[in-house]
Structures are given as C-alpha cells and as structure tokens.
C-alpha cells in the first residue's frame, strides 16, 4: 500500500485563509459614526461620522451609507469619502436608526 506524500502548498493555503478569516477587519458602529473596513473595490478603511452621512437606505438588514462628497465636509487629505454597505443585525437596527435620526436632526 502506497501513501500519498504530504502536500505542503495546500496546507499553507488552508492555514493562510484560516488566518485571514480571523484577522480581517469588520465594520463597527459607534455613537458618533461608523467604521468601514477596507474592501475589494480599493477603498481604504474609513471612519464616517453620522454628521457626514448625506443619505442612506436599508435593503433588508443591509445599511448603505453615502457620505457627503465635500472635502471640507470631512474627507481626509483632500480625498472624498467613499461610502459603503454593512450588515446590521435586526436587534441593533433600531439603535442605528436612532443615531442616524439624531444626526439628521442636528444638521
């Protein structure tokens, strides 16, 4: 009986993807804004204050944020902010909507 030799490149790829899964940054919602992670479109990780949100919409449990495009309005280093989408658990949606409503009424 002959055993197959151990395939080290395959093991390396499996370990690499497992590490990337646990290391990847996730979006986070804070009282004064939302932290969006870097994504595959090339957008860097960015923090968007609630006051910088120009408009937003819900698609089920996904919140899509479109920030102001004004450089003076809060973009960093002369680059406009890029928006993004994040999945909000159903039990947290009311809290996020309250934060967005407070920011809209303050504007």
Image (tube, rainbow, N blue to C red):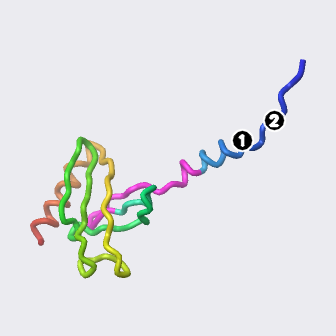
Point out the stretch of residues depicted in magenta: 20-34
Q: Which residue is mark 1?
A: 11
Mark 1 surroundings within 10 Å by alpha-carbon count, few (fewer than 14), some (14 through 19), many (20 or more)? few
- Which label sits on residue 42? none
| Of the image marks 1 and 2, the number of the one nearer the N terminus | 2
Residues tagged 1 and 2 counted as in contact (Cβ below 8 A)? yes
In the figure, is residue 42 to the left or right of 50? right
Q: Of all residues shown, which one is farthest toward the top?
A: 1
Mark 2 surroundings within 10 Å by alpha-carbon count, few (fewer than 14), some (14 through 19), many (20 or more)? few
Please tell me in which quadrant of the rendered image residue 3 appears: top right
Q: Which residue is mark 2?
A: 6
**Residue drawn at the location 28% of the way across and 79% of the way down:** 71
Magenta span has 25?
yes
Please tell me in which quadrant of the rendered image residue 103 appears: bottom left
**Residue drawn at the location 14% of the way across and 64% of the way down:** 102
Give the x, y percent position of residue 23: 54, 54
**Residue drawn at the location 72% of the way across and 41% of the way down:** 11
């Amino acid at each position: 009986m002959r055993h197959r030799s151990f395939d080290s490149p395959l093991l390396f790829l499996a370990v690499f993807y497992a590490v990337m899964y646990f290391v990847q940054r996730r979006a986070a919602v804070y009282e004064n804004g939302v932290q969006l992670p870097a994504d595959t479109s090339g957008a860097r990780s960015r923090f968007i204050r609630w006051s910088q949100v120009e408009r937003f919409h819900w698609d089920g449990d996904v919140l899509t944020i479109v920030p102001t495009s004004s450089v003076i309005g809060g973009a960093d280093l002369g680059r406009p902010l890029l928006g993004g989408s994040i999945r909000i658990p159903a039990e947290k949606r009311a809290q996020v909507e309250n934060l967005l409503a407070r920011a809209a009424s303050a504007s």
